Image (cartoon, rainbow, N blue to C red):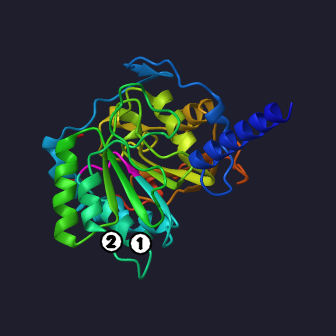
Amino acid sequence: MLRRMLAVLTLLVIVQSATAFRLRGDDKPSAAQERPRPNEQARRTYMGRIVAQPMSHLGASWLIRPERNAEENAIEALGQLGIRPGMTLVDLGCGNGYWTLPMAKACENPGIPADDAKRDETTDTPIKNFGEGQPGDEDQIDPNEDWDGQVIAVDIQREMLQKLRRNMAREGIGNVLPIVGKVDDPRLPLGEVDLVLLVDVYHEFSHPESMLWSIHRSLKPEGVIALLEYRTEDPNVPIKPLHKMTKNQIMKEYTASHFKLVREYNELPWQHLMFFARDDSPLPAIEPGATLPSAQRTAPTPSPSKR
């Protein structure tokens, strides 16, 4: 009898240790961690809209055009993200790093040198959603990795990440981890992320339900998605309609994937900026505000665009 009791106690300790291994700190698993991964095929349409094709790496120069800040007021948008030193950030669809690099500078822990050698070893290696690895998956990063003060930069195109690495080296930035994502899985750590930035990329997801499911699992209880999408409501935004979204469409899709709107910023020239938290987050939900008419905005001069 005593041996049986000891065996049960040992099993309980192992289970508790495994749970602590997967979930660092005091964060509880999100509701999405209890839901199965969506069985989703690549979509051509989703909830009434056409899914756009991803931007090719061949057009990467458009992402860093000199006039981009004048057109989109990216500096102002960056300031609205609320980035603080020590945060764990994700730039999902990072491209060549237009947003990644300033994010890395903003979240870096002061006084902690970047481990360049470590970054070189781990770049391009997918992160397991710990406890969710697939049989035969050989690539793995130590789940005890400390993500504080880092940007996880995800893109599905290796060529984009190569451009990002060159830009990182040029600016001497070491607290960025480039990751090759999958079209249905960004390969993010479980329950570790303070903010996921999606800049004009969500509308290109061929597996939007699966991607939002994965992001939901990655967020801390008060973590958020910062979503930037060009505004359909404003005909003066010089972007092709396929690459724009309305607030109503965004709300419909994110609510369906168990997110709630917790903040928004409506003063950018071309884009919506909306912040979504997990539906079980302690952050209070808000209703979306009206989109300002274009007459109330300063319309920038458009540049030649792939869009």
How many marks do you count on the picture?
2
Residue 229, how many percent across, how many down? 42, 45
Image x and y of residue 231, in percent: 43, 44
For the point 16% across and 60% down, the residue is 166
State the residue at coordinates (58%, 37%): 251
Q: Check the image and name the residue furthest to the left.
A: 58
Visible residue check, residue 293: no
Asked if residue 205 lies left or right of residue 286, the reply is left
Q: Earlier in the sequence, mark 1 or mark 2?
A: 1
**Classed neighbour count for the residue bearing mark 2: other residues with Cα under 10 Å, few (<14), some (14–19), many (≥20):** some
Q: Amino acid at mark 2?
A: Ala
Tell me if residue 297 comes above or below residue 4 in the rendering: below
Q: CA distance from mark 1 to mark 2?
A: 9 Å
Residue 278 left/right relative to 236: right
Q: Is residue 91 visible?
A: yes
Front residue of 156/283: it is 156
Q: Which residues are magenta?
A: 91-95
Taking depth in this image into account, of 196 and 227 the one nearest to the observer is: 196
Q: Examine the image and state in which quarter residue 258 appears.
A: top right
Q: Secondary structure at mark 2?
A: loop
Asked if marks 1 and 2 touch (Cβ < 8 Å), the reply is: yes
Type of amino acid under label 1: Glu
Mark 1: secondary structure: loop
| Quadrant placement of the N terminus | top right
Give residue 176's position: percent from left, percent from top. Answer: 33, 60
Q: Which residue is mark 2?
A: 114
- Of 284 and 31, which appears nearest the observer? 31
The percent coordinates of residue 201 (x first, y second) are 36, 41
Report which residue position mark 1 lands on.
108
**Nearer mark to the viewer, of 1 and 2:** 2
